[in-house]
Image: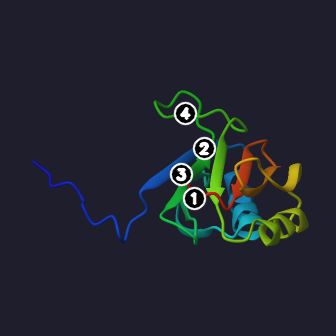
Amino acid sequence: MSTPHTDTTVRPRLWGTLQAHDAAALIDFYTGAFGFTATARHHDADGRVAHAELLWPQGAGGIMLGDHAPGRAWSREPGTAGFYVVTADPDALHARAADHGAQVVSPPHTTDHGSREFTVRDPEGNLWAFGDYPGA
């Protein structure tokens, strides 16, 4: 019987997952536009990204992604993911994302519950909301 990993202070506690038509380009976009840090990248025999891990530098989470693989048990249709990511400075991140070509869906604004946030679409169509609301 294996022992579960219990050291959650070091490892991310939440992993969002998605697949892409061009995972290599999307990894470059996420690191440039949003500031994710690529920590792992594995390729299959055809040179496609089979698995990659990107950490969110401002929190205990990240994303896993790879090139679209229809028919696998864990297959996700590209362009259908959505995320809310907590950031300390939504306005600065918005400027960075826009400078890297993110399609702005909703510019920075203050919500009724007091969060400063914005929403963009990545090159594959996934929605990303970033804001300073850390949850209740």
**Identity, as a three-letter code, of the amino acid under mark 3:** Ala
Name the mark nearer the viewer: 1 or 3: 1
Crowding at mark 2 (Cα within 10 Å: few <14, some 14-19, many 20+): many
Q: CA distance from mark 4 to mark 1?
A: 29 Å
Residue under label 3, please give it. 45
Sequence-wise first label, 4 or 1: 4
Residue under label 4, please give it. 75
The local secondary structure at tag 2 comes to strand
Q: CA distance from mark 2 to mark 1?
A: 23 Å
Sequence-wise first label, 1 or 3: 3
Residue under label 1, please give it. 134
Residue 50 seen from this side: no
Q: Are marks 1 and 3 in contact (CB under 8 Å)?
A: no
* Residue 118, position as x, y percentages in the image: 80, 54
Crowding at mark 3 (Cα within 10 Å: few <14, some 14-19, many 20+): few
Q: CA distance from mark 2 to mark 3?
A: 20 Å
Residue under label 2, please give it. 18
Q: CA distance from mark 4 to mark 3?
A: 19 Å
Sequence-wise first label, 2 or 3: 2
Q: Is residue 129 above or below residue 29?
A: above
Q: Nearer the viewer, residue 53 or 109?
A: 109
**Identity, as a three-letter code, of the amino acid under mark 1:** Pro
The local secondary structure at tag 1 comes to loop
